[in-house]
Each structure stands twice: as C-alpha cells, then as structure tokens.
Image (cartoon, rainbow, N blue to C red):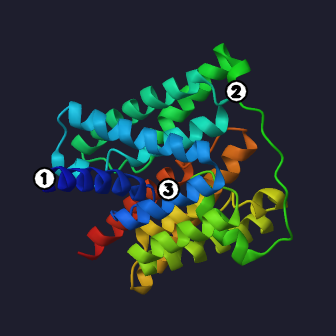
C-alpha cells in the first residue's frame, strides 16, 4: 500500500513539475498553483492542460526517455501549453481532444529531439505544434476554429497589466489567474517573479510608446514573453538585469512585428529573444575570459 501511495505521489509530482516548467520552475507547488489558475480562468482549459501534461509525460515513459528528465517535468510543459492553446483556438469538440492527445505527444517528442542535441528549445515545441494545428485547421477545417469572445476591459493599470502578463503565458486574461501565477513563481524563485513583473511593466510601457493598441497592452499581450525572458536571465547581479532588459527589448520587437503581420506570436518572441541574448552573452563572456 505504501509503495502504491509513494508511486502515485511521485507521478503526481512529475506531472505538476511539468506544468511548473512552463515558467521554468521545477516545483510541484508552483505547478499546482498554475493548474488552479488555469482552472479558475477556464475549467475546460484546466482539463486540457492536465490531459496534455499526462500525455506528454506518458509519451516520454513509453519511448524510454531519460527518467531524470521525465521527473524534472521536461516533457510536460510544452504539452500542457498545447492543451490550453487547443482549447483557445478550437471549438471544444471530440476532434479537439484528439488534437490535444496527438499534439502533446508530438510536443514531447520534439522536446526530446532538442534535448538530445543540447539545444535550449524552451517552449519551441509548443509553438511549432500549435502553428501546425492552426495551419491545418485554417486550411482544411475552418469551421472547427473557435470564435473569439470579446473581453471586457477595465481602466489601464500598469501593475495589473504586469500580473495579467503572467496570466497570458498560459492564455488566461483575468487578473486572479495572473496573480496566482505570480505567487507560484515567487514561491519557487522570488527574484525571478519580481524580475518578471518588472519586465512585463517595462514591456507594456515601451509598447505604449510605440503606439501599440492600448486594449492589447491592457490584456498583457505585450508582456508575457517579457515575463519568460526575465525568468531565464534573472539573477542577483547588475549584469543580470542588463541581460533581462536586452532580452525583453528583443522579445517586444519580435512581438510587435508578428502582431503586425497577423502571425500568432505564442511564446516564439521569448524563444527567439532568449536565443539571441544567450548568443550575445556567450560572446561577451568568452571575450572577458
């Protein structure tokens, strides 16, 4: 009995760590709060995230990927994002659940492809799978695409926009979910959470200066990639803050371009900006060494 309980707790911990890894946090409590935040925003999105995390993790087990990587949650986070995105972009029909199962498995396999080649893919597998899903449905099953629902906006508030940016990492546009996500990251890494909040606010201010639509800014659409960039580079040294700012500026530039071109940005600006910043950081570190 104890063995069964222990195994169940281990499996649950792995799944929650997978969800926590959405914001690069290998922490079960963080993952639980993320899941609660998603369920608060949308029960069906919460179910989709949980199913997708399970499918991604099971895929990794079946394909005999490294057990340490599995228990760290590395095969659950892109899968979970695929699940939430599917419920955002598609109608909640049987086919959508099939897409979630297949898409989360594919995301796990892509994650393994990048891990084996020591490429820091971050959330790129989620981006690639979601782009593929949108391409297929836009061209072959347009009637299954969800109809966007209008969002009621409140007066602009920089702090609220910062928290909403945390929410938008997982497609939640309400303040409560954003606050939950912030607290979840803070529990795991206070400095990462605070850097993320500051980066989201700075990104929103810069977006406003560049005349980005105020409604999109209020929803946190120009800040969530900045949150992820800040979490990657957060640290207790001054130069860490500089690299956070560099990554945030790159991410915002990519976001503005993709929104202008009507390309679903997802977390691609974060991935690309982080790659560029890591390249520059590596160059400077080698020059100093």
- Residue 28 lies, in percent from the top left, at 35, 63
Please give the name of the residue rendered at 49% of the width and 44% of the height, measured from the top-left corner: 49
Q: Where, quadrant-wise, is the C terminus in this rendering? A: bottom left
Which residue is identified by label 3? 35
Note whether residue 15 is visible.
yes
**Residue 271's spot in the image, x, y percent?**
47, 51
Local packing at callout 2 (Cα closer than 10 Å; few below 14, some 14-19, many 20+) is: some
Mark 1 residue element:
helix
Name the residue nearer the viewer: 192 or 188: 188
Asked if residue 15 is positioned above or below residue 167 in the image, the reply reads above
Residue 243 visible in the snapshot: no
Give the mark, 1 or 2, whose residue is nearer the N terminus.
1
Per the model, the C-alpha gap separating discs 1 and 2 is 45 Å
Quarter occupied by residue 17 = bottom left
Q: How far apart, in angstroms, are the residues tagged by discs 3 and 2?
A: 24 Å
Give the camera-side residue of 153 and 109. 153
> Which residue lies under the disc numbered 1?
3
Q: CA distance from mark 1 to mark 3?
A: 26 Å
On screen, 126 above or below 17? Answer: above
Query: Which residue position is annotated with label 2?
Result: 145
Residue displayed at 80% across by 42% down: 149
Q: Which one is earlier in the sequence, the residue at label 1 or at label 3?
A: 1
Q: Choose between 35 and 227: the one closer to the eye.
A: 35
Asked which quadrant contains residue 89, the reply is: top right
């Amino acid at each position: 009995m104890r063995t069964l309980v222990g195994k169940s707790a281990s499996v649950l911990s792995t799944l929650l760590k997978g969800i926590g890894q959405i914001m690069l946090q290998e922490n079960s409590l963080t993952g639980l709060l993320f899941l609660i935040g998603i369920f608060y925003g949308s029960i069906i999105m919460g179910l989709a995230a949980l199913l997708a995390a399970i499918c991604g993790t099971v895929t990794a087990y079946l394909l005999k990927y490294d057990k340490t990587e599995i228990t760290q949650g590395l095969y659950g986070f892109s899968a979970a994002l695929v699940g939430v995105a599917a419920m955002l972009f598609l109608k909640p029909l049987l086919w959508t659940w099939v897409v979630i199962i297949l898409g989360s498995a594919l995301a796990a396999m892509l994650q393994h492809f990048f891990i084996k080649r020591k490429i820091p893919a971050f959330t790129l597998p989620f981006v690639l799978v979601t782009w593929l899903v949108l391409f297929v449905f836009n061209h072959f099953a347009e009637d299954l695409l969800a109809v966007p629902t209008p969002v009621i906006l409140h007066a602009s508030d920089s702090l609220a926009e910062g928290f909403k940016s945390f929410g938008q990492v997982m497609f939640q546009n309400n303040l409560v979910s954003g606050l939950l996500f912030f607290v979840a990251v803070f529990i795991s890494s206070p400095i990462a959470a605070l850097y993320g909040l500051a980066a989201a606010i700075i990104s929103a201010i810069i977006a406003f200066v560049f005349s980005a639509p105020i409604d999109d800014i209020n929803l946190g659409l120009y800040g969530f990639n900045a949150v992820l960039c800040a979490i990657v580079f957060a640290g207790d040294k001054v130069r860490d803050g500089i690299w956070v700012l560099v990554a945030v500026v790159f991410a915002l530039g990519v976001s503005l371009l993709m929104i202008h071109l009507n390309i679903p940005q997802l977390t691609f600006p974060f991935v690309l900006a982080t790659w560029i910043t890591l390249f520059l950081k590596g160059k400077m570190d080698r020059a100093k060494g």
